[in-house]
Image (spheres, grey):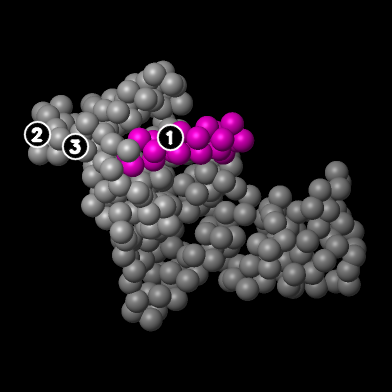
């Protein structure tokens, strides 16, 4: 392996035997004059492929133990969730965790408005977020606040999203536009697409599309009587949701479970109520 550029004494940019760029971590690996050939590969503690140049600079500005911790979280998530995550994620997650530790030291705690949505819609990713917080406790001796479970989970969700294939990207973009048009027409409103609540709405729809396309829906939790109650108290929102569901079935062959139906209703209601935010 050729070590071609020093990042710091323990981190360097290298090329493997196939000529691929790789960021390598190892004690003293960046100390010798560059370039040089590393013959003892046991000196490499961790290697990262396909990392973008703007993320490589994070390797020099973050504590190495935090990067390794984040890498362990990403590796565990890939195994448990059976997915490929963005190769930049160990560095962006490490940056977040390092900032979270700084906030704890300063006594600053941030809330996560999406925590309920995240926990319900992405329970497996949330388990990984909890694993990350526990790993920080074990290795750093710091108790991160509960909100960090969901902050880490969001990083993992976005790591999945960034690796979505082009087909899904195009599909979700088209379907979101169609659903937005239906909501605007049925409720006679113009959605503030720059607002936080619309972003939250889009996130819900995007992952609803992902589950529908994969045939993996939330099922068997909600009592259908809750949906009937919602229909009585929010008839306009319910009619709008039925238009959306009918559109999805007619154009894509997707049929939503009662659980998904109720959460769609709730998100349509929320985006209407907070449309000016």
Vertical order, 35 against 161 (above or below): below
Give the residue number, with chain letter if any, for mark 1.
178
Q: Answer whether labels 3 and 1 touch (C-beta < 8 Å).
A: no
Q: Dots 2 and 1: beta carbons under 8 Å?
A: no
Residue 230 in percent (x, y) is at 14, 36
Structural distance between the alpha carbons of marks 3 and 1:
18 Å
State the image quarter where residue 248 is shown. top left
The residue lying furthest to the bottom in this view is: 106
Q: Residue at position x 36%, y 66% from top? A: 144
Disc 2 to disc 3, C-alpha distance:
10 Å
Residue drawn at (52%, 43%) of the image: 160
Q: Secondary structure at mark 1?
A: helix
Residue 47 bears which disc, if any?
none
Q: Residues within 10 Å of mark 1 (few under 14, many from 20)?
A: some
Q: Find out whether residue 258 is within the magenta segment.
A: no
| Residue at image location 61% in from the left, 35% down from the top | 166
Q: Position of residue 182 (x, y in %)?
A: 35, 35
Q: Residues within 10 Å of mark 2 (few under 14, many from 20)?
A: few
Please determine whether, in this image, residue 28 is positioned above or below residue 68: below
Q: Is residue 216 left or right of residue 166?
A: left
Q: Nearer the viewer, mark 2 or mark 3?
A: 3
Residue at image location 35% in from the left, 49% down from the top:
190
Q: Is residue 171 inside the magenta stretch?
A: yes
Q: Which circle marks residue 232 in the picture?
A: 2
How far apart marks 2 and 1 lie (CA) works out to: 26 Å
User: Quick one: SS at disc 3?
Assistant: helix
Q: Position of residue 126 (x, y in %)?
A: 37, 47
Q: Is residue 172 left or right of residue 245?
A: right
Query: CB under 8 Å between callouts 2 and 3?
Result: no
Residue marked by disc 3: 236
Span shown in magenta: 164-184
Give the quadrant of the C terminus.
bottom left
């Amino acid at each position: 392996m050729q070590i071609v550029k020093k990042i710091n004494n323990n981190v360097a940019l290298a090329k493997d035997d196939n000529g691929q760029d790789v960021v390598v971590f190892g004690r003293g690996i960046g100390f010798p004059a560059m370039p040089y050939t590393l013959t003892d590969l046991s000196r490499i503690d961790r290697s990262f492929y396909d990392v973008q140049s703007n993320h490589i600079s994070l390797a020099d500005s973050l504590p190495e133990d935090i990067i390794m911790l984040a890498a362990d979280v990403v590796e565990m998530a890939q195994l448990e969730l059976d997915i490929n995550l963005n190769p930049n994620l160990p560095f962006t997650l490490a940056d977040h965790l390092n900032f979270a530790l700084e906030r704890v030291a300063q006594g600053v705690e941030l809330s996560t408005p999406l925590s309920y949505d995240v926990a319900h819609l992405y329970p497996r990713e949330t388990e990984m977020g909890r694993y990350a917080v526990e790993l920080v406790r074990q290795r750093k001796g710091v108790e991160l606040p509960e909100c960090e479970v969901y902050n880490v989970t969001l990083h993992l969700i976005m790591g999945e999203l960034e690796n979505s294939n082009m087909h899904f990207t195009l599909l979700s973009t088209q379907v979101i536009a169609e659903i937005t048009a239906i909501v605007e027409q049925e409720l006679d409103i113009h959605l503030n697409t720059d607002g936080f609540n619309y972003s939250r709405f889009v996130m819900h729809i995007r992952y609803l599309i992902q589950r529908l396309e994969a045939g993996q829906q939330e099922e068997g939790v909600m009592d259908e009587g809750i949906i009937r109650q919602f229909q009585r108290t929010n008839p306009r929102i319910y009619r709008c949701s039925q238009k959306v569901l009918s559109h999805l079935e007619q154009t894509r062959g997707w049929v939503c479970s009662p659980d998904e139906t109720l959460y769609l209703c709730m998100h349509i209601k929320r985006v209407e109520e907070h449309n000016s935010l």
